[in-house]
Amino acid sequence: MIEIEDKCNIADPGPNPDTSSTSVFDDLRISIIDNYNELEAEWQDFEAFAVDYSSCSAWCRAWYEAHATNKHLTPFIVIGKSPNGTIQFLLPFMKRTLGPFQLLVRPGVKHSAYFSGIFSPELAGDIRGGDRPAFWRHVMASMPQIDVIWLEGVPQARMSLFAGEESFSSSNACTSMQIDSDWDSQYLEIFNSKARNNDKRGQRNLAKLGAVKFSVVTERSAQDKLLVDMLAQKSAALKKSGKSSPFEDHESLEFYRRLLARYEADENTKILLSKLSVDDELMAANLGVLFNNRFFGMIISTTDSDARRHSPGRLLLLEFNRYLSQNGIAAHDFGTGVAEYKNNWCDQTIERYHVLMPSGAKGKFLARVIRSTAGLKAWVKRSKYKSRVAAAHSWAMRARTAMRKHFTN
């Protein structure tokens, strides 16, 4: 059985605030660190209070290292310590240059669902029970020449830490399902006879093509090979459907390679990489993080060959859930995005929010631009007039990309 320390569930906001406590915000000593080597040991110890994997040191360090040559993205780690030197909060950011603007974004925004930083339970209680804007003003005052902090994907249960700041709901919630200790019984309960017969038919049809095998890949060289293959498979599927792929550039591949290497020795988290193959041909693959006794799916890819009609992606997930059940994993988080299979499988929806913290006139202007662009994207997704506005939305995205390239070249 895989043993993962069960710390805090991502839906658990932590202890109730002690409204009688005295604010310690003014006593916090805030520092900015751009060399993650300086605090790696402290960061790993402080992860005992983390509720999302993308705030952990292995994740962020892999991202920082993969983008080390990008002159427009630099590490910007905000540390708050008590007078006795104990860490009270840690916010890992990337400082991004966008023309005349400087903004802070979280590492790996397109590659993870959640982010909320790491806070000690005591400070989190003080923030919830005290003057939240005063805390964030204290933080912002320690960041010279930063126009906007832009936090994407804060889970609803953590929004109490950001109350009073400008925020809006993400158009993409996350969906999750509990995993029972008896997967076979759970499978019978969730899916009707028609769905189960379709699964059996898919398995039979794949078996006609060759030997069908499900496996969780643990050997490092095999993981690296599968990673390359699944990113290529995922990118091809996205391009075929007319979408851009965040997995094609060298930095993304380097990030996942470093992630696999770092999690191999990490005590708090673990990468799980699985595949379904027919003979030596990859039918489907799945990659995600095991954290907090929950599996957080990040990438799932499927073949675009004729075998796709036999639902290899679904069959992979069925076998993978059996693996999670057998190893005592409590839940499978499918991440963001709308898909029919998620509606059928999942029993929990986790709302996510975007938080904007502008500073000064420049920051307020940039925040309005970010808010407007994100709002248009969300409206397009929800609108029944998608066909009429898709072209306008596409034009807006191209204009934003062109402006970004103009400013950063």
Image (spheres, grey):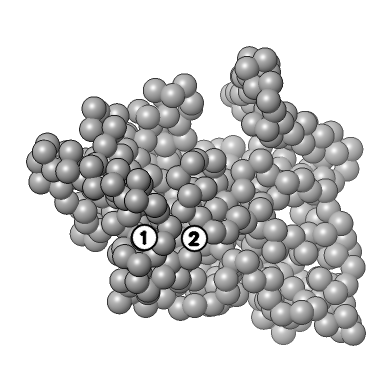
**Can residue 102 be seen here?**
yes
Q: Do the residues labelled 1 and 2 touch (CB within 8 Å)?
A: no
x and y percent of residue 128 in the render?
81, 71
| Label 1 packing within 10 angstroms: few (<14), some (14-19), many (20+) | some
Is the residue 89 above or below the residue 136 in the image? Answer: below
Considering depth in this image, is 54 or 305 the residue closer to the camera? 305
| Rendered residue at 67%/80% (across/down) | 86
Quadrant where the image shows the N terminus: bottom left
The quarter of the picture where residue 156 lies is bottom right
| Rendered residue at 28%/33% (across/down) | 308
Determine which residue is flagged by label 2: 177
Camera-side mark, 1 or 2: 1
Considering depth in this image, is 286 or 248 the residue closer to the camera? 286
| Label 2 packing within 10 angstroms: few (<14), some (14-19), many (20+) | some
* Label number found at residue 187: 1
Between the C-alphas of marks 1 and 2, the distance is: 12 Å
Considering depth in this image, is 56 or 2 the residue closer to the camera? 2
In primary-sequence order, the first of circles 1 and 2 is 2
The quarter of the picture where residue 263 lies is bottom left
| Disc 1, SS | helix
Is the residue 51 above or below the residue 297 in the image? Answer: below
Q: Is residue 316 left or right of residue 87?
A: left
Give the number of callouts. 2
x and y percent of residue 166 in the render?
83, 48
| Rendered residue at 48%/49% (across/down) | 344
| Disc 2, SS | strand
x and y percent of residue 173 in the render?
61, 48
Considering depth in this image, is 201 or 124 the residue closer to the camera? 201
Q: Which amino acid does label 2 sit on?
A: Met
| Rendered residue at 63%/66% (across/down) | 11
**Can residue 66 be seen here?**
no
Q: What residue type is labelled 1?
A: Tyr
